[in-house]
Amino acid sequence: MAIQKQEHVGSIWFTWIYISDTHSELLITDYQISEEEAYAFQQAYLEQHQYDDTPPTIVDPYADKEVLRGAALYIKNNNPNMTQWNTYLSGLNWYDAYMVRFWVAKLALILAERYEINITDFTEIKVLAALKTYIINQPLRKLNRLLFGE
């Protein structure tokens, strides 16, 4: 049975629908809900909430700041061309290399939105060139604050 309890006061109906041993849903209507309607509500509720206990996966590129800090310092200290940059990335774990690439792209987009860099072409080489010039020209303390909030 889906209906756990029903009461009415005047023309208002209060219907408690069983969801689990510790959870019921209260529906307030102007008519008496049938068992079939309650069952349909119960099943729809269970379907909507079947993944509520699944923990979210939060992707945070800043979880490993040292890899990102190393990439920023590599750019600042070496002014790499695309070949040197790819060589640097190939020396990282594959997942760190992808994280750094994502971070560089996202950082460039944010700086472009702030009008701090100008990106005329969104190819990797143009984005890296614009970001590289920006990073090289900034003091380390400002970069640390801007890039890592420290």
Image: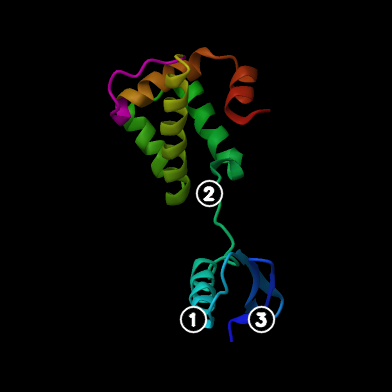
> What's the distance in space between the residues labelled 2 and 3, CA to CA?
42 Å
Amino acid tagged 3? Gln
- Residue 59's disc is 2
- Could you say where residue 41 lies in the image, as x and y percent from the top left? 52, 72
Question: How many residues crowd mark 2 within 10 Å: few (<14), some (14–19), many (20+)?
Answer: few
Which sits in the foreground, 62 or 58? 58
Residue 55 visible in the picture: yes
Residues shaded magenta: 116-125
Q: Which residue ends up furthest to the front in the rendered image? A: 10
Residue 93 visible in the picture: no
Residue 1, compared with residue 43, is above or below; it is: below
Kindly report which numbered mark, 1 or 2, lies closer to the viewer in this rendering.
1
Question: How many residues crowd mark 1 within 10 Å: few (<14), some (14–19), many (20+)?
Answer: few
Residue visible at 36% across and 31% down?
84
Amino acid tagged 1? Glu
Q: Secondary structure at mark 2?
A: loop
